[in-house]
Image: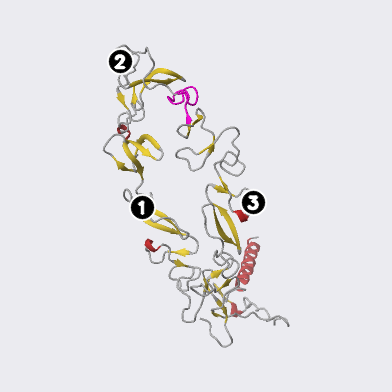
């Protein structure tokens, strides 16, 4: 029994060694040349079928021939620098310029056609291009957009808002002062000029028979009624004794660092100052950590605003240090307190000088084709079109470059 088992193991081992020898010339302890294994037979060569063309490589050389969609016009600076599909000065053909920018509309060249785009505050409500963006938004029929009808209320542009709105905010009433020619949104429960109703002005000196006024107090509109004792604007009764016989009146002046917008509104305790902004006119605790104050700090509240010198394009690195304005080539940026520009589309700032804007057109400049410093073969007259150096198949015998 043991001998039979030994023979079985030996036969299995020999089979494994023969299989291994089919892929190598030598197996440990066995020489394939001695007949223990056979050499693999290579596959036979098969000739390609008749009529099948062999693939060949095409050599390309620099070219000054404009690709489809690009051309050179009389006003061109470089070869092939006009794209009929997007050039507003040559939209669809040389010299076919789109209408110039106006207060109400601007035209872009899109797919070779001049397409109108309305400026902020204007809209094209009749869909007729010939008369432009004919509607100036802000009316009761077209308040914020075409057909935005203010039902029974006026369309108002309130301080600090870039776009108008229908009517006043909740709690406020729209009032018209015909004498002064002004429009306003008033709190009828508190407004001395519109107490309980628009135009109902409370007497500034109080009413006959009323007691003398405590310091910094007045009679005015409270709960929509005139003749009520209250504090003058900018003062507060922080000790709550205004109606006491020996009252010291509205003893606390607001708009200070200790009492900015109300009693106990301590800005310094919050690491800030009491600031009154100008546009819009708002008093608040301002200039949180990371912001710097710009304006007058002689009196309380400080008159001015809080700005981030690291990113504010109007106060970049210091108060009043403005970055260059936006253009059709770039947008201004303030990065870590330094003015930079963000180039748009095909334009690039290759010399690093923000004063001359994004001076390079990378779609057509053969010395900066597709990016700064990417040069085409200038000696061969190679053109740059769409940000790529133009090539064409080499002529017979011409070496590719």
Residue 74 image position (x, y, % from top left): 53, 74
CA gap between label 3 and label 2 equals: 67 Å
Q: Which of the labelled discs sits on residue 127, or is there none?
A: 3
Who is closer to the viewer here, 7 or 32?
32
Which residue is located at x 55 percent, y 86 percent? 398
Q: Position of residue 195 (x, y in %)?
A: 46, 23
**First-in-chain label (1 vs 2):** 2
Q: What stretch is highlighted in magenta?
A: 185-200
> Is 119 placed left or right of 239 in the picture?
right
Q: Is residue 229 above or below residue 69?
A: above
Membership of 199 in magenta stretch? yes
| Residue 171 drawn above or below residue 59 | above
Q: In this view, does 223 lie to the left or right of 242?
A: right
The answer to which of 101 and 295 lies nearer the viewer is 101
132 relative to 225, above or below: below
Instruction: Say if mark 1 contacts mark 2, CB within 8 Å.
Output: no
The relative height of residue 291 versus residue 259 in the rendered view (above or below) is: below
Q: Name the residue under label 2.
A: 247
Task: In the rendered structure, find residue 322 and report the number of the disc placed on it.
Answer: 1
Residue 244 in percent (x, y) is at 33, 12
């Amino acid at each position: 029994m043991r001998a039979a088992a030994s023979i079985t193991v030996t036969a299995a081992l020999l089979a494994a060694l023969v299989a291994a020898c089919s892929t190598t010339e030598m197996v440990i302890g066995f020489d394939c040349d001695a007949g223990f294994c056979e050499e693999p037979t290579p596959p036979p060569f098969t000739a390609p079928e008749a009529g099948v063309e062999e693939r060949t490589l095409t050599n390309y050389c620099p070219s000054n021939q404009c690709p489809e969609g690009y051309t050179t016009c009389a006003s061109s600076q470089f070869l092939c620098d006009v794209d009929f599909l997007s050039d507003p000065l040559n939209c669809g053909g040389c010299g076919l310029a789109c209408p110039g920018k106006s207060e109400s509309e601007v035209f872009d060249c899109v797919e070779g056609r001049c397409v109108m785009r309305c400026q902020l505050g204007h809209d094209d409500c009749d869909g007729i291009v010939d008369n432009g963006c004919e509607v100036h938004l802000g009316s009761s029929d077209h308040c914020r957009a075409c057909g935005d009808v203010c039902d029974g209320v006026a369309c108002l542009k309130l301080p600090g808002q870039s776009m108008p709105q229908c009517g006043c905010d909740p709690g406020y009433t729209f009032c018209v002062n015909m004498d002064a020619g002004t429009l306003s949104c008033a709190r009828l429960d508190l407004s001395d000029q519109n107490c309980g109703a628009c135009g109902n002005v409370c007497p500034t000196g109080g009413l006959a028979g009323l007691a003398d006024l405590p310091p910094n107090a007045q009679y005015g509109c409270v709960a929509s009624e005139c003749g009520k004792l209250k504090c003058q604007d900018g003062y507060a009764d922080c000790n709550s004794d205004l109606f006491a016989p020996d009252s010291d009146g509205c003893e606390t002046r607001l708009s200070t660092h200790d009492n900015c917008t109300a009693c106990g509104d301590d800005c310094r305790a919050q690491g800030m100052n009491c600031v009154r902004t100008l546009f819009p006119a708002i008093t608040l605790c301002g200039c949180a950590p990371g912001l710097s104050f710009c304006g007058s700090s002689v009196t309380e509240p400080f008159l001015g605003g809080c700005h981030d010198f690291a990113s504010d394009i109007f106060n970049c690195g210091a108060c009043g240090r403005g970055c260059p304005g936006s253009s059709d080539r770039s947008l201004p940026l303030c990065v870590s307190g330094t003015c930079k520009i963000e180039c748009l589309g095909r334009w690039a700032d290759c010399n690093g000088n923000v004063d001359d804007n994004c001076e390079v057109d990378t779609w057509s400049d053969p010395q900066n084709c597709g990016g700064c410093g990417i040069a085409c073969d200038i000696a061969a007259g190679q053109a740059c079109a769409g940000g790529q150096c133009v090539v064409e198949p080499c002529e017979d015998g011409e070496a590719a470059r």
